[in-house]
Image: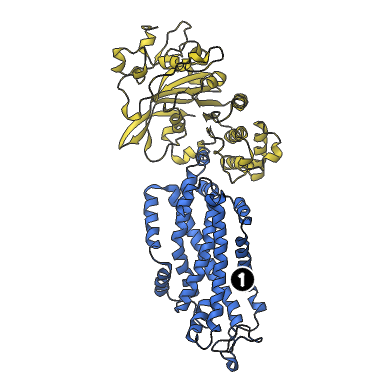
Amino acid sequence: MMMNADDDAVLTISNLRTEFRIGGVWHAAVRDLSLTLRRNETLAIVGESGSGKSVTALSILRLLPNAGARIGAGEMMFEGRDIAQLSEHEMSRIRGNAIAMIFQEPMTSLNPTMTVGQQIAEVITIHRHVPHSEASAEALRLLREVKIPAAESRIHDYPHQFSGGMRQRVMIAMALACRPKILLADEPTTALDVTIQAQVLMQLDELKQAYGMSILFITHNLGVVAQIADRVAVMYAGEVVELAGVETLFARPTHPYTAALLRAMPRADRSSDSLEPIAGSVPPLTSMPPGCAYAPRCPHKLPSCVQARPALQESSDLAGDRSHLVRCPVRLAGASP
Amino acid sequence: MSTVALDSGPSYTLQQLARAFNANATSWIGLITFLIIVALALLAPIISPYDPLDQDILARLAPPTTEHWFGTDSYGRDILSRLLWGARLSLVISTVSILTAMLIGGVIGILAGYIGGRFDMIVMQAMDVLLSFPSLIMGLMVVAMLGASMGNLMIAIALTAIAPFARIARAPTIIVKERDYIEACRALGYSDLRIMAVHILPNIVAEILVMGSLWLATAIRIEASLSFIGLGVRPPTATWGGMIREGFENILDAWWLAVFPSLAILLTVLALNLLGDALRDAIDPKLRAE
């Protein structure tokens, strides 16, 4: 897909299928996922709980549990190699090095028995094989870079001496330690309060420019998406239902699910009385409907929706944005308002 | 023990342990008594009034006097000197065997807890088989098979203690490996070995040390018991268990022969148990909450 963008692609995922074994049968948590992460862009993956967004990130780093999970199909091309085919040893050289990840819970994502300086230096010594003194100096530089005040003394502090926002900065410093090409951010600001959230988001954006990396940003918060993303992939029940540039998505949400998500989001320019919850819930892995996964909750549903699974198609909307993809033939045909 | 560990979400750093240690006076009594015993054992060559093997035929079975504080035995050897030298042996045997058990059992427990699955099941069932033997019977079997010597005694005691250490290391490993930061370690490309040694071990070492102090007391008891039934270090080397055995034959005529080594064992085991209990209380969240 999207041949025009491939020259600039850092990571090209095609037809990824990640499966979990439930009751002896493999069920797909991520289905036919194709995404391209371009150089120096922030691609947001949005979806509610259980939509497969975190599983996508864990698949890229191959961090799925050994038993009961597998990458069933698809390829993930990174620097000319398919990540899905790499050996565990080759994979461990990519993790934390070329592809790094930050997690949702900064309070528990650091080792309580080591100082933050030691933890940052550890990543550097392991992947860059530099002497300890050099790694420590680099750790200090990174702490300054993520704007930890009084970094010279804080480098000797333990994680419990830091606040949540500070710890998330330390996590970011660790992730950046080896200048990754790709940063996977799995809801990194969800556990932080709103003012700290905004600071961390701004900082991530600055660091993205400074380091020239690409960010795959996973969130369920559309407000965060508007603030940080260049492009957005909306996921539902393990598949991408809409993929568009951030302006296009907010201006012309085309898939009924995207539209419903936007109506369910509180906004400063609207009364919160007009929030509309989406009735129903994501279908469980074990009983995916044969047709469109969103059909059971969709107000625009036609009889054809429940028969065959719709494909991701280009939207020929007014602006001629050819990179706007939608998995809904009904809305694309304009059969329904 | 394992249920306590499972309830207690957080694990304990050595710092926290030290702080909790101060809260309890008996922990200090235990620690100081134990340190005095260790010091006496270390200083035995200097402070013991006689050679522990020197026989004084004229002073056989002498009751405690100013000359022989704790009396003499049936060969006229000074009990106090034999006690001091025996302390060295008892402490060396128990410490070496428990350290060995700690190391082997700890590694087995961390591996079982970290790898999990079928490996965990098989290894821990093997440990359960080991645990099903009472430690004295187990020691008897090993010494009977290998022969009575100091080295074999240590092997026997270590073997009986491996399984408890494996269990005590496994439970917190299972808790710690589910923590977010272990997942973060994987995402940073750390090897399993590094995760276990650098990121899991320091979080569970306090629990293993507590168990160690309690098992040190057990090891001294096992050593004494095996020496008592003649499966310990060969006479005439002085060991506490061996001294009680010799004294037991004359218990009606010369009470001091058996009583002083028994008191030495009692005191050492008591000190270690106080110490171990204090450490265990320190890491028990239910007691810490009070």
Q: Colour of chain A?
A: yellow
Quadrant of the image occupied by residue A26: top left
Q: What residue type is labelled 1?
A: Ile
Image x and y of residue A273, in percent: 50, 14
Question: Is A233 displayed left or right of B42 in the figure?
Answer: left
Question: Is A221 displayed left or right of B49 in the figure?
Answer: left
> Considering only vertical position in the picture, is A270 above or below B255?
above
Image x and y of residue B190, in percent: 52, 42
Quadrant of the image occupied by residue A117: top right
Quadrant of the image occupied by residue B90: bottom right
Colour style of the rendered protein structure: by chain
Q: Name the residue under label 1.
A: B37
Residue at the location (49% across, 69% down)? B154
Chain letter behind tag 1: B
Determine the residue located farthest toward the top in the rendered image. Answer: A318
Residue at the location (45% across, 25% down)? A12
Q: Work out whether residue A81 can be spotted.
A: no
Check disc 1: other Cα within 10 Å, few if <14, some if 14-19, many if 20+: many
From the viewer's side, name the closer residue of B248 and B151. Answer: B248
Q: Colour of chain B?
A: blue
Image x and y of residue B119, in percent: 38, 51
**Mark 1: which secondary structure?**
helix
- The quadrant of the picture occupied by the N terminus of chain A is top left
Q: Work out whether residue B141 can be spotted.
A: yes
